[in-house]
Image (cartoon, rainbow, N blue to C red):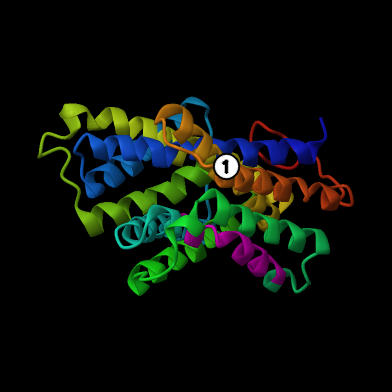
Amino acid sequence: MNQKWKAIGLVIFGSIVYGFVSITIKMAYERGYSFSDVLGMQLLSGFMLLLVGTTLFRQWEKVNRKQLVQLLLAGTLNAMTGIFYQISLQHVPASIAIVLIFQFIWIGVLIECLIERKRPAPETIISVVLLLIGTAMASNVVKVGLSGLSLYGVAFGLSSAVTYSGVIAASGRIAVQVNPWMRSLTMNSSATLLVWVLFRPTPFTDGAFVGGLWYWGLIIACCSVLIPNLCFAAGTPKIGSALAGILGSVELPATVFLSWIMLQETVTPVQWVGNAIILGGIGATRLKLKKRKTVPFRVSDGQPL
């Protein structure tokens, strides 16, 4: 298999797995667990899983001071993305919040253009336009409408898009010499610490942990912290943050499909068409991929050969 396609496959797989997150979080909320407890256990469980995996697979390696600072800062961006998005959900409909955070698609392209000081390719622009149109349709934002929206919720929704774009950009540029396990563990450590300091979850004192929150924490952590982080850490350096952001939009069709299957949620024809447009937008990137050269890639650790 072409080496670049291996990286693309990792990013797509990580994004599809991330589509389970909103579903499992919703199921946890339905069982009475609070926002702070769910978020706190999600990150703590993710940290423990990464810690065990890094140890079992012998992925420990020395990280210099510059790399450590970069990874810790990237981890705070990851935490802020979750915080901003959850706050946005409390003030605007879920369909609107999804559209807001999915602005990371064009923001990610803009960030890469500014860093590399070059204009986006026509194929990239076409892909971004298709993805934004598809997102609006797939999230059913047309039916919900935009009247009476909370500016507070909109601001936090857009903030989550900015921070998420930063996370993707960081995945492809900082400490790329460090293996994905070590990178993900370091980033998650700062995210976990930030959330536990700010929100002070109480799952160990209010009985939530022994009441079953540990189970949901592990599931959500696997879908949001462990698998996606490792896939993005291994794949993004090989394809660039702009393309990774575009491929990451497959998360929305995955979420819609899984909600339809697992939660029996109604999906309208317009939403199915929107999902098809999103997949078409992702497919448009193939035009650009054919023009790019590949680099040697080792799936086991995401490093150049």
The residue sitting at the left extreme is 206
Looking at the image, is 129 positioned above or below residue 11?
A: below
Q: Amino acid at mark 1?
A: Pro
The quadrant in which the C terminus is found is top right
Q: Position of residue 297 (x, y in %)?
A: 75, 38
Which residue is at a point 27% across and 42% down the rendered structure image?
38
Residue 178 visible at all: no
Q: Position of residue 37 (x, y in %)?
A: 23, 44
Judging depth in this view, the residue of 22 and 117 nearest the camera is: 22
- In screen coordinates, is 215 left or right of 141? left
Looking at the image, is 105 positioned above or below residue 261?
A: below
Q: Which residue is mark 1?
A: 269
Figure quadrant of residue 75: bottom left
Looking at the image, is 208 positioned above or below residue 246?
A: above
Judging depth in this view, the residue of 25 and 136 nearest the camera is: 136
Residue 152 visible at all: yes
The residue sitting at the top extreme is 56
Which residue is at a point 39% across and 57% down the rendered structure image?
85
Figure quadrant of residue 175: bottom right
The quadrant in which the N terminus is found is top right
The residue sitting at the right extreme is 291
Report the magenta stretch's main SS: helix
Which residue is at a point 70% across and 53% down the rendered structure image?
243
Extent of the magenta region: 98-113
Q: Position of residue 250 (x, y in %)?
A: 61, 44
Could you say whether the residue bearing mark 1 is in a helix, strand or loop?
helix
Number of marks drawn = 1
Which residue is at a point 88% across and 47% down the rendered structure image?
290
Q: Position of residue 251 (x, y in %)?
A: 55, 43
Mark 1 burial class by Cα count in 10 Å: few <14, some 14-19, many 20+: few
Judging depth in this view, the residue of 67 and 238 nearest the camera is: 238
